[in-house]
Image (spheres, rainbow, N blue to C red):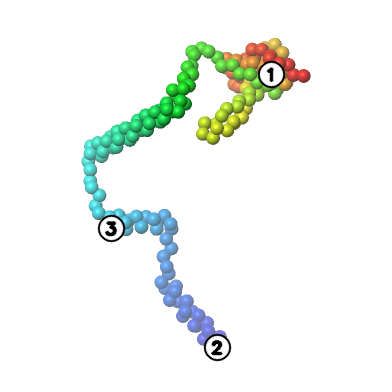
Amino acid sequence: MAEEESETTEVETAPAAAAPEEVVSPKERRSRTRARKAAKAPAAKTLTHEQRHAERLAQRAHKAAERRRGRLRAREKAKARGTGAAATPAREHVQGKQKSRSGVVVSDRAAKTITVRVDVAHRHRRYEKVVRTSTTLHAHDELGDAHVGDTVLIQESRPLSRTKRWRLIEVLERAK
């Protein structure tokens, strides 16, 4: 009886083993699908290189014209609202004018160098929320008169070391 049962199980599994289902990777499946679609699709028009180039140029010119029209509309809207480029003139960069920042000294351990934290608050362009950020700058302090907690004025300068690009101008307020 046991032998008959084992024979029936072998017979039942044999047909399944004879015709295994082909295992295809997803990449191969996509490739085959694309090939089938390409075979069904009508033949694509064949263009010369010059014709393709001319089409591309025409399309780029059309998109450029659309962009110009959109910018013009945006400018008209801004002018009507009284905001935008018309209301606030752009700041001009003055040649040779160094930037100045005021901040709080967070470290004065290095010789002739102070680390200054500069806090910046600005309004987000889209969400109108006040965003506060800070950055730390290394400044040259020749006399060593700035200490931790002091509020100082620093000015941009030529590179003095790998990280120092600022110099101390004056100590605005001493720490208590």
Indicate the secondary structure of the residue bearing disc 2. loop
Image quarter hosting the C terminus: top right
* Percent position of residue 136, x then y: 63, 25
Question: Residue flagged by tag 3: what amino acid is it?
Answer: Lys
Question: Residue flagged by tag 2: what amino acid is it?
Answer: Met
Residue 1: give its label: 2
Front residue of this view, candidates 15 and 111: 111
Residue appearing at x 53%, y 84% in the figure: 5
Question: Alpha-carbon neighbours of circle 1 within 10 Å: few (<14), some, or many (≥20)?
Answer: many
Which quadrant holds residue 106? top right
Q: Is residue 26 above or below residue 88?
A: below
Q: Can residue 86 be seen?
A: yes
Question: Alpha-carbon neighbours of circle 3 within 10 Å: few (<14), some, or many (≥20)?
Answer: few
Front residue of this view, candidates 40 and 79: 79
Is tag 2's residue or tag 3's residue first in the polypeptide sequence? 2
Q: Is 25 left, or right, of 149 in this rendering?
A: left
Q: Is residue 5 above or below residue 174?
A: below
**Residue occupied by mark 3:** 40
Residue 151: give its label: 1
Q: Residue furthest bottom?
A: 1
Q: CA distance from mark 1 to mark 2?
A: 98 Å
Instruction: State which mark lies toward you, 1 or 2.
Output: 1
Residue appearing at x 26%, y 38% in the figure: 55
Instruction: State which mark lies toward you, 1 or 3.
Output: 1
Indicate the secondary structure of the residue bearing disc 3. helix
Residue appearing at x 49%, y 18% in the figure: 91
Image quarter hosting the N terminus: bottom right
Asked if disc 1 and disc 3 are in contact, CB closer than 8 Å, the reply is no
* Percent position of residue 89, x then y: 46, 20
